[in-house]
């Protein structure tokens, strides 16, 4: 019986959510599995991966073969590196302390990289919101400016009407003023 580490799909249409499982290679994609190793949510940026690294390494040591996508996820979380280091310990190339130190350094560097990406994404999002706000503010100011001349024209017309009411002129008086 060959064992595969693969993804088992859950979630609804258009919103996938995966379990990372160890399953018999002959079992259906969403069918019976031997053990759940973790979860993978690709719907957010960066994707959320919750993986029991030690359990994944145990399955890898027992001969489970990861699928391509599962292998990428295991590499991303460090399970493949830890499996490699355990092999080095077994062969005598490393001590347990050296392997733990290498793995801890790798995990720390990976977490820093992920936090930098999250910071960059949040900065880009805030910059986009600020640009949208500035554009909206410019549009509103343009609307206000476009509305002002209408108000001024109405005020000018009202002034002319008021002047006309104060000094009633006849046509002859208006023509005399125009001739001067």
Image: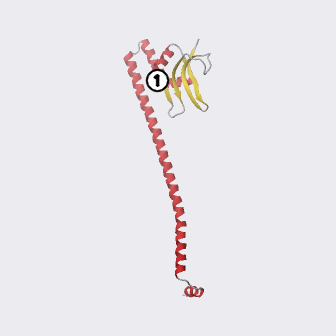
The tally of labels here is 1
Q: Quadrant of residue 21?
A: top right
Q: Nearer the viewer, residue 11 or 162?
A: 162
Q: Residue at x 53, y 83 (%)?
A: 167
Q: Answer left or right for 5 relative to 102.
A: right
**Viewer-proximal residue, 83 or 37?**
37
Render colour scheme? secondary structure
Q: Quadrant of the C terminus?
A: bottom right
The image shows residue 104 at horizontal and vertical percentages of 40, 23
Q: As displayed, is residue 113 above or below residue 70?
A: below
The quarter of the picture where residue 25 lies is top right
Q: Which residue is mark 1?
A: 78
Residue 20 location (% of width, % of height): 54, 22
Please tell me which residue is depicted at 52% across the width and 70% down the height of the picture: 155
Question: Which residue: 39% across, 16% down?
Answer: 96
Quick check: 94 left or right of 14?
Answer: left
Q: Position of residue 61 (x, y in %)?
A: 49, 14
Residue 17, quarter of picture = top right
Report the front residue among 75 and 33: 33
Residue furthest toward the left? 97
Query: In this picture, is 72 found above or below 160?
Result: above
Viewport quadrant of the N terminus = top right
């Amino acid at each position: 019986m060959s064992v595969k580490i693969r993804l088992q799909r859950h979630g609804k249409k258009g919103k996938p959510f995966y379990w990372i499982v160890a399953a018999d290679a002959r079992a259906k994609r969403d069918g019976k599995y031997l053990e759940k190793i973790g979860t993978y949510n690709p719907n957010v940026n960066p994707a959320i991966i919750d993986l029991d690294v030690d359990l994944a390494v145990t399955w890898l040591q027992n001969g489970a073969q990861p699928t391509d996508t599962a292998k990428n996820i295991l590499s991303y979380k460090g399970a493949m590196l830890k499996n490699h280091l355990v092999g080095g310990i077994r062969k005598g190339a490393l001590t347990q302390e050296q392997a733990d130190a290498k793995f801890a350094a790798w995990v720390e560097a990976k977490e820093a990289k992920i936090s930098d990406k999250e910071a960059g994404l949040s900065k880009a999002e805030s910059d986009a919101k600020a640009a949208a706000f500035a554009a909206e503010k410019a549009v509103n100011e343009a609307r206000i400016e476009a509305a002002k001349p209408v108000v001024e024209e109405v005020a000018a017309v009202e002034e002319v009407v008021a002047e006309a009411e104060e000094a009633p002129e006849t046509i002859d008086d208006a023509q005399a003023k125009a001739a001067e």
